[in-house]
Structure formats: structure tokens, C-alpha cells
């Protein structure tokens, strides 16, 4: 299993991040389609259950060059379904990623939390876990998936601060 702690600072309060950014339709569409360049992003469901919000999205990310063993393993059309639960009391978003290929051999999960950093600033922390149970190349796949996650979150952080400035959100 491979793990990473990914941190980025945003120019807004924790409340603004959760209530006006993270679950906002326009923000998510622009993040996934424009900033990340994903060919497919679709919110399947979003349900407020009082103490929690449950959301399911389906995406097909833009894939760069893959090492030959990974390309042979996953082929074309790699996508995933992200199933997330936001706990309103703990203010944490738990996510499980279900890949459309190798779902029985690849496990991806994580938790997003926000740490206030004073007036109009906060830090997003994403604790990611990836486990690939594939003899010989599991470690290579885990490292590649974590690298892609880190790159995506860095791109997303830059976009998020630009979006906050554009919308005048704090």
C-alpha cells in the first residue's frame, strides 16, 4: 500500500470552501473539464441526508504516457466512479474510488479535511491511500496513481485560488 498527504492553501475560509466551492456545480464542472482536461465528468447523484452529504461522480481522466506494463494492464478508456460522504459535524469528506478496470485488484480511498489558517485562509489536506494487488507491478501502479493524484490536486489548487479570486469569494 502507498499513502500520501497532499496539502494546499486556499485564499478562503473553511466555511467558504465547503459551502461555496467544493459542492458547487459550476466550480466542479470547470475544475474537471477545463482545469484538469478530463474528457468526461458527470455528477451522478448528490443527496443531503441531514448529518451528511453523499455524492457520486463518474469521470474519465486524461491519461499521459504509461509505462508499457501498465498500458498493457489497463488499456484505453480508464475511468472511475468517486463515491464520497461529507460528514457535516466532523467536516470531513471520505472518498472511495472505484475504477472501471481492475476494481477487484486496485483500491483507492482518502479523506479530505480543512484546517483554518486564520482570516480568510485555510489548508486542504487530502490523505490518500492506494493499494494494488497485482503481482510484479502493483508497486509501480500504486506510485503512478499517487503521482497522478498529486498532480491533479496541485492543478486543482491553482484553479481553486483563481476561481475564488474570480468570484470574489473569501
Image (cartoon, helix red, strand yellow):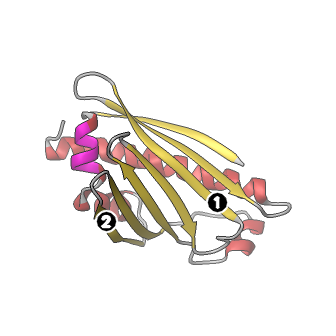
**Which residue in the structure is indicated by mark 1?**
107
Residue 83 drawn at (x, y percent): 46, 63
Q: How many marks?
A: 2
In this rendering, would 91 be left or right of 107?
A: left
Numbered label attached to residue 86: none
Q: Which residues are magenta?
A: 15-21
Between residue 75 and residue 136, name the one nearer to us. Answer: 136
Mark 2 lies on a secondary structure that is strand
Label 2 to label 1: alpha-carbon separation: 23 Å
Residue name at image x 28 percent, y 45 percent = 18
In this rendering, would 147 be left or right of 11?
A: right
In this rendering, would 137 be left or right of 145?
A: right
166 versus 34 height, above or below: above
Tell me which corner region of the image, top left, top right, bottom left or bottom right, holds residue 8.
top left
Work out which residue is located at the far left of the displayed protein and give it.
Answer: 168
Q: Is residue 19 magenta?
A: yes
Residue name at image x 28 percent, y 29 percent = 121
Residue name at image x 43 percent, y 67 percent = 38
Mark 1 lies on a secondary structure that is strand
**Which residue in the structure is indicated by mark 2?**
46
Residue 15 drawn at (x, y percent): 24, 38
Lower sequence index among marks 2 and 1: 2
Q: Quadrant of the C terminus?
A: top left
Residue 65 drawn at (x, y percent): 63, 64
Residue name at image x 21 percent, y 48 percent = 20
Amino acid at each position: 500500500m502507498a499513502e500520501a498527504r497532499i496539502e494546499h492553501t486556499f485564499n478562503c475560509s473553511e466555511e467558504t470552501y465547503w459551502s461555496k466551492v467544493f459542492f458547487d456545480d459550476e466550480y466542479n464542472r470547470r475544475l474537471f473539464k477545463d482545469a484538469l482536461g478530463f474528457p468526461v465528468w458527470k455528477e451522478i447523484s448528490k443527496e443531503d441526508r441531514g448529518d451528511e452529504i453523499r455524492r457520486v461522480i463518474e469521470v474519465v481522466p486524461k491519461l499521459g504516457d504509461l509505462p508499457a506494463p501498465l498500458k498493457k494492464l489497463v488499456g484505453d478508456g480508464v475511468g472511475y466512479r468517486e463515491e464520497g460522504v461529507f460528514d457535516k459535524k466532523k467536516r470531513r469528506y471520505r472518498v472511495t474510488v472505484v475504477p472501471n478496470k481492475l476494481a477487484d485488484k486496485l483500491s483507492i480511498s482518502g479523506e479530505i479535511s480543512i484546517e483554518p489558517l486564520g482570516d480568510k485562509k485555510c489548508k486542504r489536506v487530502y490523505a490518500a491511500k492506494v493499494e494494488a494487488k497485482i503481482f510484479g507491478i502493483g508497486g509501480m501502479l500504486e506510485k503512478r496513481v499517487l503521482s497522478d493524484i498529486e498532480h491533479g490536486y496541485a492543478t486543482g489548487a491553482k484553479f481553486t485560488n483563481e476561481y475564488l479570486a474570480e468570484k470574489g469569494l473569501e
